[in-house]
Image (tube, helix red, strand yellow):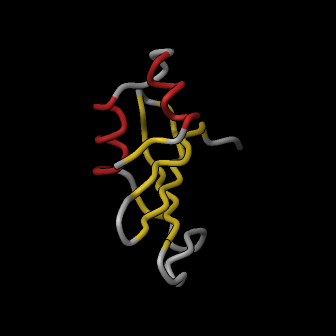
Amino acid sequence: MEYSDAVRDQLQNKQLDTTDIVNLLTDGDVDFGRSDTKSGSCKTYIVEGLIKEQEMIATVRNCNKKALLESIVPVTK
């Protein structure tokens, strides 16, 4: 999986680490209502879960040859 510049910045600034990302993507829930699973070569998935007890939303673009973690942001209510 590749990371966007924004996610790389979060990793460099120690706002999160690769274990946080793996746990979010493994244990989180895909919001299929907000995801775009019908696109041709690239599908976008919205994954909701916890990082360090804070609710977060990850946006993942899953294309034919690679997956890109576009963003990880806190849930705003």
Q: As displayed, is residue 76 above or below residue 59?
A: above
Q: Residue furthest front?
A: 65
Q: As displayed, is residue 30 above or below residue 69?
A: below
Query: How many marks do you count on the picture?
Result: 0
Asked if residue 50 lies left or right of residue 1, the reply is: right
* Location of residue 16 in the rendering, given as x and y in whole percent from the top left corner: 43, 25
Q: Residue at x 29, y 41 (%)?
A: 22
* Location of residue 72 in the rendering, given as x and y in whole percent from the top left corner: 53, 40
Q: Residue furthest right?
A: 77
Q: Residue at x 30, y 41 (%)?
A: 23
Q: Residue at x 56, y 44 (%)?
A: 71
* Location of residue 4 in the rendering, given as x and y in whole percent from the top left corner: 52, 41
Q: Residue at x 38, y 52 (%)?
A: 28
Q: Quadrant of the C terminus?
A: top right
* Location of residue 25 in the rendering, given as x and y in whole percent from the top left corner: 35, 50
